[in-house]
Structure formats: structure tokens, C-alpha cells
Amino acid sequence: MPDQPESLRPISPRRLRIALVAVAGLAACVVGLGVVGRVHADQQVASWTNVQAVPTVRVISLADRSGSRALVLPGDVQAFNAAPIYARVSGYLKRWYVDIGTPVKAGQVLADIDTPDLDQQLAQAKADLQTAIANQHLSDTTAHRWAGLLSQDAVSQQDADTKNGDLAAKTALVASSRANVARLEALESFKRITAPFSGVVTTRSTDIGALISVGGPAATPLFTVADESRLRIYVRAPESYSAAIQPGMTATFTVPEYPGLSFTAKLATSADAITPQSGTLLVQLQIDNADRTLKPGGYAQVRFNLPTNPGALQVPATALMFRDNGMSVATVGPAKRVVMKPVTVVQDLGAMVEVAARLTPEDRVIDSPPDSLRPGDLVRIAPSGAPANGADAHAAG
């Protein structure tokens, strides 16, 4: 038999067993490596999970705030004196002499009103007065004559008393007529609308020929005069600051029409009572405005520099935690364990709050703590400038 190729020769049982053992060993190695890799991966996942379970927090340093703190509140700018001027007599506007923005002096005529009805009433009252005077003179003459006849016993006492009584009645009618004339003459003086004080005309709501009615439900002022040489700024301060705001202190304020420019006003007085509806104290500041730089009726942002409470500590409002047992802050204690400390807010300063608590400037307060944080939890402190758990945090105080 000729020789067969090497590839066609039958494999001996011994070589076959060796091959099977080699394949089994290789499979065992693969399985072992897979198990070892899986166990190592599970250990890494468990380790990573344990690390991630520890929250990363940002801590801030507390500071003992001394000196003063700023309180910024909105204010209303008003003229020191402002008077809407209404008509006291009905008629038609005959002429006006000043327009808005016109400076006026006290007593200066602003407009004239044509009042034909009132003029006729005054003329009638004067005629009635003359009639009453004439009747009084006649009664007086009669009374004197009857007094002479009574002295001669020519008339009875009753007749003489009647004449004297008629004289008294006529005298009273004269007094009544004079009072009526004086009343109408006083109304006649209101035909000339005058300025009550020196100032500037800020509104004019009438024109020549306009009908002017007195006492109507829709009556509007003909003019408004405001004294702008001095201004009042009204501010409503929260009740918690009312003890620190006292007359005599100064405040600075800004107005929208002059960005970047501040003005100084003096606190003149306050209502000295808290408004129940808003829980605020109404205070009044005053400032000279002789150059008419500021305009009344505008908005102002007023800044008070108030003294701080001795030893008071300020923390960001984001550090406060609201729990069932009250308000508290979370601090990092020994071994990086969380320690909860109860606090009471003394002053709300907006982004910062002033608190009374068993805190010291050395305490490390956690800013923006997670809601799941509990006393004794282990935490990791984030490096300075890095966010805590991916969230923004306040810079260290």
C-alpha cells in the first residue's frame, strides 16, 4: 500500500486524549479568568458605590460681622407741599394765566372764572340789604315817636312795646342781609383762582370756556401746585428694623433718572406705630431740592446703614434646613461627620441671614445641604472652587 498523506492518517488515541485535555485546560483557564474578572469588577462597583454614597459638600467659614449692615428699601418721592386746587364757584373758565411747569408765587392768580349767576345773586342780596336798612330806619323812627307819646300817656305801654319789637326784628333782618352779602362777596373772591403757596404748577385740567361745576361727584382739580424746593421721601421699613431706625440718622438713595448718582437725605420723623396690614413702620426722610434736580412723584431706592448686633453671625439663606424640630444648619464635625445645630433667624438680609445659635466663627457650615443629610452622616468636603455634588455653592465667607 502506498504511503498516505500525513493529513489523512488516523489520529492515535493517545494524541487525541492529549488534545482533549489541552482544550479542557484552556476552557478552564478562560472560565477562571472570567470569574476572577467579574469578581474584581463587582468589587470595583461596590467600592465606587460606597464612595459615591458619601455626599460631597461645600463648607463656608462664618464671620463675626461688626460695623454696619445695609438695608435697601423702596421709597416714594413727594413734594414737601402739594395742593390740588378746586373751584369753589360754578361758572365758565374765563381765562387761565399759567401752564404746567410755571413757577408761581403765593397769591398769584392762576385763572379767572365767569360767574353770571353769582353776580346776579350778589346784586339781589345788596338790594335786599338796602330794603332791610330802609325798613329799619322807618321802624326806628316809629319806635322813637311812640316812646315820646308814651311819656305823655298818649299811648299804651303795649303799643310802645310793639313798635320796639318791630324795630328789633328789622335790625335783625339788616344783620341777616349783611351776612348774606358778605357770604356772596366771599364767593365772588373765588372767581380768581390763586396759588396757595410758592411752587410749580404740575397739572392743568381746564381750558377757556370749560364748564366748571362745584360739588359734583366727578370734580377734578383745575390746577395742582407743588413746592419742589424741598422733598419728602416716604419709606416703609419692616417691623424687625423699626428699633434701629431713629430720627436724625441719614440715608442715601438713588433714582432711575440719575444712574450711578446717590443723594443723602435725613430721617425727619416716623409714624412711631406699626401698620397692622403690612407690618411696617412708615418713616419720612427730607432733602433740600432748591436746584430742582429731583422730581416729586418718582421712585427711589433708599439705603440705610444700620449697626449690627454684637457677636451676630451671618450665614447664607441657602444653608438653612427646615426640619420637623425647627430650623437648623448642618456643620462638619470631627471625622467629617455631620452635626446639626438649631438656629433662630434674627434678621433677614436677603441672600444672607443673621442668626442666633450655638455657632462659632470656627464652625464649618455646609452650604446648600442635600435634604437627605442626617446627623452623623459621613461627608466629603469639596475642594475650594469646585461645586458640591454638581450644584453651585456660595463662596466661603
Image: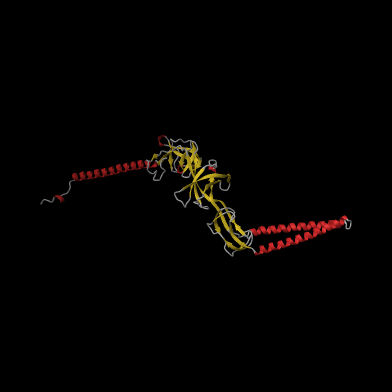
Residue 195 placement: quadrant: bottom right
**Residue 210 position in % (x across, y down):** 59, 64
Comparing 268 with 199, the one in front is 199
Name the quadrant of the C terminus. Answer: top left
Q: Residue furthest top?
A: 334
Q: Residue furthest left?
A: 2
The type of colouring in the image is: secondary structure
Count of numbered tags = 0
Going by the image, does 141 lie left or right of 312? right
Comparing 192 with 148, the one in front is 148
Q: Residue at x 22, y 44 (%)?
A: 22
Mark yes or no: residue 86 visible.
Answer: no
Q: Is the residue 336 above or below the residue 98 in the image?
A: above
**Residue 309 position in % (x across, y down):** 50, 38
Going by the image, does 277 lie left or right of 121? left
**Residue 14 position in % (x across, y down):** 19, 44
Q: Is the residue 396 above or below the residue 180 in the image?
A: above
Q: Residue furthest right?
A: 153
Residue 364 placement: quadrant: top left
Mark yes or no: residue 94 visible.
Answer: yes
**Residue 159 position in % (x across, y down):** 86, 58
Comparing 387 with 148, the one in front is 148
Comparing 349 with 381, the one in front is 349
Residue 207 placement: quadrant: bottom right
